[in-house]
């Protein structure tokens, strides 16, 4: 059994699954933080209401970003070629995300330092940008991964990226950005309805009812666009050697409209995941209407997992396709680190990931309960 787990092909599959788990973990845990920031102007009208909304995420947002670091670290260590191309090719887009993410901690820390209404309003705007821009750009990045990215490798396997920021911000990718944004707005509204008290929770539930339906409709439309080939499609046409050396130029790949649907056609049971990606947000909308806050938040988490999981299942075994030279696309079976690296990282993950999960569960248990205006008044300057 141990030998099977440490088989090179198996390790590659395990790390593909773990990468998906970490990305879903980031979207689920840090996603509602970004959603709350993006919803701030719409669910909170007074300074006290904004403080209530901010304090629902203030104590946990830093810990939630651990999943972002884990995801980036996993890409760096397990899929170095993917890390090199995505973080260099998407450099300007990543810079926008980094700029927005920098605004978030600064906004949390500085907002309460002065009583000035203008001062606090400016930092509220920073929190809005810090939530909305990453939620949009992460979806744009996924859209470009579906469409294919213009890159190729030289004879010495040096990656060459041929695109630019404006090429990344194309209509199809921006549509994926809207799917991501509405998904995280839904998730943020579910968190506020669950964690906040009073009028903030009421407004979040009203906004969430509409946003969750919109998220379901946009995701379903995205499936239609994938089927029609507007969101790319790539398939491997040569033999796949799962335990071979990592060399991204040693296979044949063709760009075919609608190829992202093939895995679902070959394995019909996989249709459960995209189906839930459409159905569950509608249940979230019903949950908002019935004011079942805890259940609504859980279903929202499952919705996020299914929407992201659908992308991974549709692209398998492709990691990042090349639109300019499909044969140089990055695959699970030819873009990983060495067997020893994957094995050692898996051992470390088995040891430390349960610790992170246990600590996270403990933190949320300690911080259990709703946040209301009375709590903010009692806390005084210790609250955000």
Image: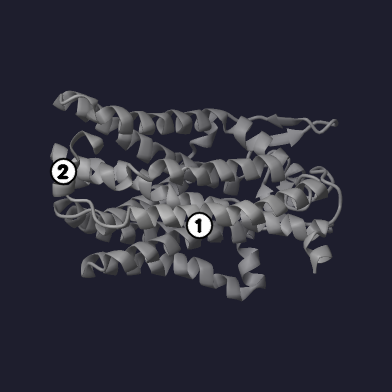
* Along the viewing direction, whichever of 297 and 57 lies nearer the viewer: 57
Q: Are marks 1 and 2 in contact (CB under 8 Å)?
A: no
Percent position (x, y) of residue 147? 59, 46
Q: Is residue 158 left or right of residue 172?
A: right
Q: Is residue 227 left or right of residue 28?
A: right
Way the structure is coloured? one colour
Q: Where 11 sits versus 155, above or below?
A: below
Percent position (x, y) of residue 208? 27, 57
Percent position (x, y) of residue 321? 67, 46
Query: How much space separates mark 1 and mark 2, taking CA atoms?
Result: 30 Å
Can residue 274 be seen in this snapshot? yes
The residue at which mark 1 appears reads as 358
Q: Is residue 317 left or right of residue 310?
A: right
Q: Secondary structure at mark 1?
A: helix
Which quarter of the picture shows residue 44?
top left
The residue at which mark 2 appears reads as 378
* Along the viewing direction, whichever of 309 and 254 lies nearer the viewer: 309
Q: Quadrant of the C terminus?
A: top left
Determine crowd level at label 1: few under 14, some 14-19, many 20+ residues with C-alpha closer than 10 A: few
């Amino acid at each position: 059994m141990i030998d099977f787990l440490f088989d090179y092909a198996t390790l590659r599959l395990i790390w593909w699954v773990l990468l998906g788990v970490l990305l879903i973990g980031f979207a689920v845990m840090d996603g509602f933080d970004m959603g709350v920031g993006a919803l701030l102007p719409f669910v909170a009208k007074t300074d006290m209401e904004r403080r209530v909304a901010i304090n629902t995420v203030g104590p946990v947002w830093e810990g939630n970003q651990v999943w972002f670091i884990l995801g980036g670290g996993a890409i760096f260590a397990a899929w170095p070629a993917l890390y090199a191309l995505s973080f260099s090719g998407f450099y300007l887009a990543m810079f926008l995300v980094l700029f927005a993410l920098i605004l978030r901690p600064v906004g949390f820390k500085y907002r309460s330092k002065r009583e000035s209404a203008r001062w606090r309003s400016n930092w509220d705007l920073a929190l809005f940008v810090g939530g909305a821009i990453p939620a949009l750009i992460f979806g744009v990045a996924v859209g470009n991964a579906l469409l294919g990215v213009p890159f190729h490798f030289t004879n010495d396997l040096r990656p060459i990226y041929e695109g630019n920021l404006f090429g990344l911000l194309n209509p199809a990718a921006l549509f994926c950005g809207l799917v991501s944004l509405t998904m995280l707005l839904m998730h943020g509204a579910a968190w506020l309805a669950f964690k906040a008290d009073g009028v903030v929770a009421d407004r979040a539930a009203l906004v969430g009812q509409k946003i969750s339906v919109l998220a379901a409709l946009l995701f379903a439309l995205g499936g239609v666009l994938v089927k029609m080939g507007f969101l790319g499609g790539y398939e491997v046409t040569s033999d796949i050697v799962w335990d071979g050396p990592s060399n991204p130029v040693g296979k044949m790949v063709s760009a075919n409209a609608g190829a992202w649907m093939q895995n679902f056609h070959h394995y019909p049971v996989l249709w459960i995941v995209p189906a839930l990606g459409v159905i569950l947000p509608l249940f979230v909308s019903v949950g908002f209407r019935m004011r079942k806050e805890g259940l609504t938040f859980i279903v929202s988490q499952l919705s996020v997992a299914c929407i992201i999981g659908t992308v991974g299942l549709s692209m398998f075994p492709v990691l990042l396709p090349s639109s300019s030279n499909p044969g140089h696309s990055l695959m699970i079976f030819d873009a990983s680190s060495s067997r020893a690296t994957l094995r050692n990282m898996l051992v470390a993950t088995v040891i430390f990931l349960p610790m992170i999960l246990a600590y996270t569960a403990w933190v949320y248990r300690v911080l259990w309960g709703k946040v209301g205006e009375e709590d903010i008044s009692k806390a005084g300057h210790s609250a955000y």
